Image (spheres, rainbow, N blue to C red):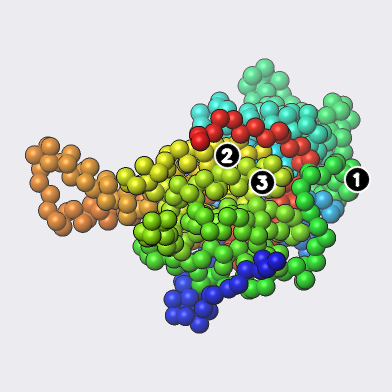
Amino acid sequence: MENVLATKLDVKAARFGANREALRVLMAALRAEEDEIRLGGGAKAAEAQRAKGRLTVRERLKLLLDEGTEFLELGLWAAYGMYEEYGGAPAAGVVTGLGRVSGRLCMVIANDATVKAGAFFPMTAKKVLRAQTIALENRIPTLYLVDSAGVFLPLQEDVFPDTDDFGRVFRNNAVMSSLGVPQITAIMGMCVAGGAYLPVMTDTVLMTEGSGLFLAGPSLVQAAIGQKTGAEELGGASMHSEISGTVDFKEPNDHLCLARLRSLVGKMGERARAPFSRVAFDAVKDAPKYAAEDLYGLIDPDPAKAATNVYDMREVIARFVDRSEFDEYKADFGRTVLCGYARIGGRAVGIVANQKMHQSQTALDGSKRTEFGGVIYTESAQKAARFIMDCNQSLVPLIFLHDVNGFMVGKDAEWSGIIRAGAKMVSAVSTSVVPKITVIVGGSFGAGHYAMCGKAYDPRFLFAWPTARYAVMSGASAASTLVEIRIKQMERGGKTISEHERKALYEEIRAQYEAQADPRYGAARGWIDAIIDPVETRAVLMTALEACALNAEVAKFNPGVLQT
């Protein structure tokens, strides 16, 4: 049996070199922006935090996490380019991600008090809820570092009342606890109003001296009931540890609080792991056979050149699966979607990936046709649906790799039953019970995004390369369609439009769509969990798969009624 993927990538080709340099430039720009986001409210706000005897959120994380381990930050781009009228909210004023604490993989949710005193903007609530959802689905122990002034009042109507707003955080606390997901909170600053419920809804509460925990602060108490009281007497660490009994551990400062938190995590018990296949793993012997850096040369990151991004998706797979081994499923059928089995970090996975190479097909009558790369045809959808069901039957987690234009259209496609086949694939994705992880490599457009396990289809994690494009259709396609609609509207109003005006309108609409398809736009709104360096794809997937394996429960697979 030969299942090692061969590479045909010409790393000396001019196109490869141009793509590589363009992506390096893009990655450098993204890293610079990420560094800026990690500064939170800036140096002045950080010094104000330290003047209170408190550490900044990044300083706290450095002490909390195991030395020398990686922190997979999620939602870093949340609120990017948003709330500018209020001075912005870098990373939505909260840090979330997966990191190791005393050897245990934990979800960390930590307020950044340098950003509007850690107040909750609408995207703050959504970011925290997404982190809780990931922790809940994967049964990941969750640690909260609380330092927040509560709801950002100018936007309270968008933070307070709905099912995916602030109150859902506390509901999730209760549900997570009921399902045995450990939660520990360290109050390391202010914790007021509705936010005071969060720590008390978790299993264990730590609090530093000088912090405050109360439903209403001294000023509001005086205004409401006329009672005058100091913050320490009203809701300080001594009061809550000695009188109310709300706090389990009172600590003098951030350093000792984090040391205690690490100690408590180190004493947590282990639950049963998921029944997914895993074999002994050797990081050196089981490494892919080809350099991950080669991935930089595959895709031209310029959205205007997306149509020229024709490449073999097997080259991507070969650079993140163990030993570059891939058991391809129905390799000669429905070839615009690749399906097959592999291992990542010793863990078995099923991979569903869009093939970007054009495929020549010969029918039984000898006629030939070309199937375009990145398009899902009837046979491709049928194959993918069956493969997804097989993975569920065999308890194999799924990885989806996107570079999809959508489903094939036209008379031939309709006669072949493309809608029926597409419905079958979407149904299989929807009812899948094994963990699903999505990586958007290139385009992810229209119904193709749905069929390839887009955000609405509950992937445990959704990552994107900087080359990702994420929209109902490409900017060029949208512009062509909308320009014609706009021109007809103008003509009905008696206005004629010149060729120059037509081109200007086209460019305006195209630019708007391209901006919205940029992965930073999607990540800002929580549609993408993290924008990842292509080189880090393997490491990110290994961490995500480890997280998925913490949940031992797998529901019964019941695909329902399938179109046949």
- For disc 3, the neighbor class at 10 Å (few under 14, some 14 to 19, many from 20) is many
Amino acid identity at mark 1: Lys
Residue 510 location (% of width, % of height):
32, 53
**Secondary structure beneath label 2:** helix
Query: Which residue position holds label 2?
Result: 428
Amino acid identity at mark 3: Cys
- For disc 2, the neighbor class at 10 Å (few under 14, some 14 to 19, many from 20) is many
Amino acid identity at mark 2: Ala
Taking the spot 37% from the left edge, 52% from the top edge, the residue there is 474
Query: Which residue is farthest bottom?
Result: 12
Contact flag, marks 2 and 3 (Cβ < 8 Å):
no
Taking the spot 71% from the left edge, 45% from the top edge, the residue there is 394
Residues 165 and 534: in front is 534
Taking the spot 68% from the left edge, 48% from the top edge, the residue there is 397
Q: CA distance from mark 2 to mark 3?
A: 10 Å
**Secondary structure beneath label 3:** helix
Q: CA distance from mark 1 to mark 2?
A: 40 Å
The numbered disc on residue 231 is none
Query: Which residue position holds label 1?
Result: 267
Query: Which residue position holds label 3?
Result: 391
